[in-house]
Amino acid sequence: MGRMFGTDGVRGIANKELSPALAFNLGRIGAYVLTEETHKKPRIAVGKDTRISGDMLEAALIAGICSMGAEAVSLGVLPTPAVAYLTRHMGLDAGVVISASHNPFEYNGIKFFNGEGYKLSDQLEDRIESLMLNPENGIAYPTGADIGKKVEVDNAVHGYVDFLKKTIDVNLRGLKIAVDCANGASYIAAPSVLADLGAEIAVINNKPDGKNINVKCGSTHPEGLQKLVVESGAHIGLAFDGDADRLIAVDNRGNIVNGDHMLAIFARHLKGKGILKRDTVVATVMSNMGLDIAMKREKCNLVKTKVGDRYVLEEMVSMGYSIGGEQSGHIIFLDHNTTGDGLLTALQLLAAVKETGKKLSDLASIMKELPQVLVNAKVKNENKDKYMKDEAIAEMITGLEKKLKGRGRVLIRPSGTEPLIRVMLEGANETEIKEDAEALAKLIEEKLN
């Protein structure tokens, strides 16, 4: 059996891999582990996105929390970063989100936050998993007056909206903004905060029915938003994913502005204001080399981690950096929140537009993306990590790295879930790097099968 927790909690098809029984046990053991050292009745926040399975899993999860004597504080439908913020703001002992982010509606997931609003460490997740897999764990069920209860918080979203409005020092009057809520957790919060700050808004995909979350909309399918921006003459478009922890923007010309471009914009803007801590931005190895070039030109440091926003966050916390993120639009502003926050990112981007007086297309021109080619090499699962042990493969990788030095790069990543090695090349000449990537992938298949 593989590890239960992935890079973003426990996920699977609802009522299949992610059953109510599993949700109950996650609630029970999660409550125990996260509150072991609490010498009072612990209180745990619970939020969810708009999936049809959310009610079922919420009921099971809350039952598990209450079975350990904890109080489940039900926040209703909220963005994931709102649960992280409210857990911290309300002084709760932990938080849980029921969401599968950008995945299709039939999937769902369960993700924990500690009392400070941070995702759990691998060690804590492993402890929860270990206790769940051991029926003789000795954890007793309380009875009588010691059983926990559920408390519902009305309009929890308003507390999050009020927090967001305080993260920028400008109003949004004069801006026309197109918004795609992905029929997800931002459908109330996004229009509310933008309207409250004075923007003129045109909103699409804000009528969730439990089954239309992420369906041909949101940050993974921004085509409809691009069309709306152009047709409506909006200054900017904002596309969120199902749980609103990521943002993909659209400029005034209808062009996509992804996480790499936004990191470059924020780095220049915050450095200019003297508030970019250590003049450093954190990204992952998947960020385009165009970001490296832009940061070097702006005299900003760029630190790269392995893929996953949890690794970006770990680097930020350990080294005292204030901003980091991923190409996918997970951007973390650690001075404001403890996780990727699509709405917070949107406000910071809108503030940069207002404060500079420039169009988003002009701001985004700070970075030019290098062409990127990704080819999958199918190999035996047991051979995925052996590519550098083969002399011919290692020699070809070294040769390509020398060929691209300073104007491109080679990135080899074994898949964590499939019998594949992903071969990614970046460079100025797309035709050339495509030929090189395919040749390297072919060699890997020949040598490792």
Image (cartoon, rainbow, N blue to C red):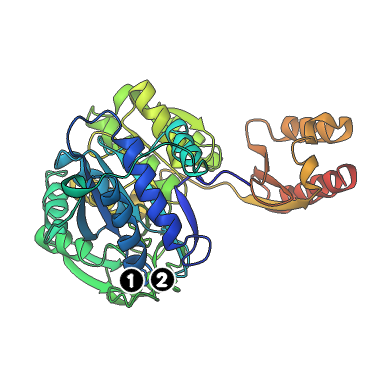
Which residue position holds label 2?
Answer: 217
| Visible residue check, residue 238 | no
Q: Amino acid at mark 1?
A: Asn
Q: Amino acid at mark 2?
A: Cys
Figure check: 210 above or below 332: below
- C-alpha span from label 1 to label 2: 8 Å
Q: Secondary structure at mark 1?
A: loop
Which residue sits at x=38%, y=61%?
A: 241
Numbered circle sitting on residue 183: 1
Figure check: 166 above or below 274: below
- Is 327 placed left or right of 169 in the picture? right
Q: Return the residue nearer the eye: 272 or 240.
A: 240
**Given the current orientation, which residue lies at the most extreme front position?**
144
Numbered circle sitting on residue 145: none
What x and y, as percent, mark residue 74? 21, 56
Quarter of image, res 79:
bottom left
- Is 171 placed left or right of 293 in the picture? left
Q: Return the residue nearer the eye: 25 or 244.
A: 25
Tag 1–tag 2 contact (CB < 8 Å): yes
Q: Secondary structure at mark 2?
A: loop
